[in-house]
Amino acid sequence: MKILLLHGINLNMFGKRDPAQYGTVTLAEIDQRVQALGIELGAEVESFQTNHEGEMCERIHRAHEEGFDAVMINAGAWTHYSYGIRDALAILKVPIVEVHMSNVHAREPFRHVSVFADIVKGQICGFGADSYLLALRAAISAV
Ligand code: DQA
C-alpha cells in the first residue's frame, strides 16, 4: 500500500512556530514517526511539503497518475480558503484524510471552515503530532 502525505504552507516551520498550538516536534520528526508506523502497518508513506500553492496542485495532479492508495493532507492555512487545492484534490479517486495538529474548531472562526470538508473521507484534528498517526490508521482503514 502506498500513501502520499502532503504538507502545505508554513508547516516546514513546525518545531519553531507557535509551540502552544503545535508543540516542538519538527516536520522531519513527524515524517519519521508516520513512516515508522507505516512500516508496522504495511504501508509505504511518501511525504511532500511546499509553501507554493501551484506546486501543491501539481504534486496532487501527479499523484493522480502515480498509483497511491490514499492521500493525507495538512494544507495549513490553505485549508480554509484554497479552492485551487480543493479542485485538485477533487480529481483524486482515492480516499483523502484531512489532518491538523491543532483543534481548529477551538481556535479563530476562520479556522472552523475547511473548503475540503465535503470531498475528504474524514478529518482528524487536535491531537498534535499524533493526529498524523491517527490519520494514517484512518487512511489505511479507508483503503
Ligand atoms: C493547521 C491549522 C491551520 O489553521 C493553520 O493555518 C496551520 C496548521 C494545524 O495543523 O493545526 O498552518 O493546519
Image (cartoon, rainbow, N blue to C red):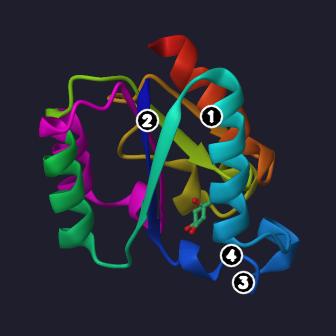
Q: Nearer the viewer, residue 13 or 3?
A: 3
Mark 2 burial class by Cα count in 10 Å: few <14, some 14-19, many 20+? many
Asked whether disc 2 touches disc 1, contact meaning CB atoms under 8 Å apart, the reply is: yes
Say what amino acid the circle numbered 3 marks: Arg
Q: Earlier in the sequence, mark 4 or mark 1?
A: 4
Q: Which element is circle 3 on?
A: loop
Asked whether disc 3 touches disc 4, contact meaning CB atoms under 8 Å apart, the reply is: yes
- According to the image, label 2 marks what residue? 3
Q: CA distance from mark 2 to mark 4?
A: 22 Å
Q: CA distance from mark 4 to mark 1?
A: 21 Å
Q: Which element is circle 1 on?
A: helix
Q: Which mark is residue 17?
A: 3
Q: Earlier in the sequence, mark 2 or mark 3?
A: 2
Mark 2 or 3, closer to the camera: 2
Please provide percent x and percent y for residue 34: 66, 45
Q: Locate residue 41: give its quadrant.
A: top right
- According to the image, label 1 marks what residue? 38
Give the residue drawn at x 64%, y 68%. 27
Q: Earlier in the sequence, mark 3 or mark 1?
A: 3
- Mark 4, ligand 1, within 8 Å: the answer is no
- Mark 1, ligand 1, within 8 Å: the answer is no
Mark 4 or 1, closer to the camera: 1
Say what amino acid the circle numbered 2 marks: Ile
